[in-house]
Image: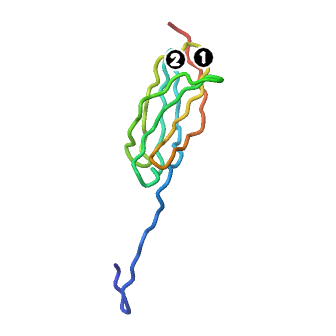
Amino acid sequence: MVLNFFCPVYFFMFFFLGQPDSPRIGQVRCNVRSATIKWTSSFNGGVSQTFTAIAILPHREASRSKAIYDEGENKIHYIELQNLKPLTKYAFFIVAQNKHGNSSSEEIECKTLEGW
């Protein structure tokens, strides 16, 4: 409450609970059999959210992380997806989910390196 000379003035902030805003991928770095994904979280929809990192090949999912807990809005997160094949192009994205729904980042492509 703010008091002025004439009468009290009240300020209220309203926001609606809903699905989280899309996470923003900052970087994907491919190695021989893994890839490291760096992303920034967005507004969680007013309730706690988790993230899942996903690697896909044409027509199928190749790898998926366990649930990753949010460190807070606009915080940087990292995950390394394992068990990828060498010299293979994958598309990577992050899914944010809460009890009201989910949203996905844009896809970023990266080709794993040659090696054993």
Residue at the outermost right position:
58
Instruction: Give amino acid for label 1.
Output: Thr
| Relative to 15, residue 71 above or below | above
Q: How many marks?
A: 2
Residue depicted at x 38% and y 39%: 69
Q: Are marks 1 and 2 in contact (CB under 8 Å)?
A: yes
Query: Which residue is more in the foreground, 13 or 19?
Result: 19
Query: In the rendering, at what x and y percent does residue 68 appear?
Result: 40, 35
User: Which residue shows up at 51% across the image and 15% down it?
Assistant: 32
Mark 1 falls on what kind of element? loop
> Residue drawn 45% across and 38% down?
51
- In this view of the protein, which residue sits in the foreground, 21 or 5? 21
The reply, left or right, for residue 92 in relation to residue 46 is: right
Furthest toward the bottom, the residue is 6
Q: Residues within 10 Å of mark 1 (few under 14, many from 20)?
A: some
What residue sits right under mark 2 in the picture? 84
Looking at the rendering, which quadrant does residue 86 occupy?
A: top right
The CA span between labels 1 and 2 is 8 Å
Q: Is residue 48 above or below residue 85?
A: below
Residue type marked 2: Leu
**For mark 2, does the 10 Å Cα neighbourhood hold few (<14), some (14 to 19), or many (20 or more) residues?**
some
Q: Position of residue 2 (x, y in %)?
A: 35, 80
Q: Mark 1 highlights which residue?
A: 88
16 to 62, vertically: above or below: below
Which quadrant is home to the N terminus? bottom left
Left or right: where does residue 6 sit relative to residue 21? left
Describe the element under mark 2 as helix, strand or loop: loop
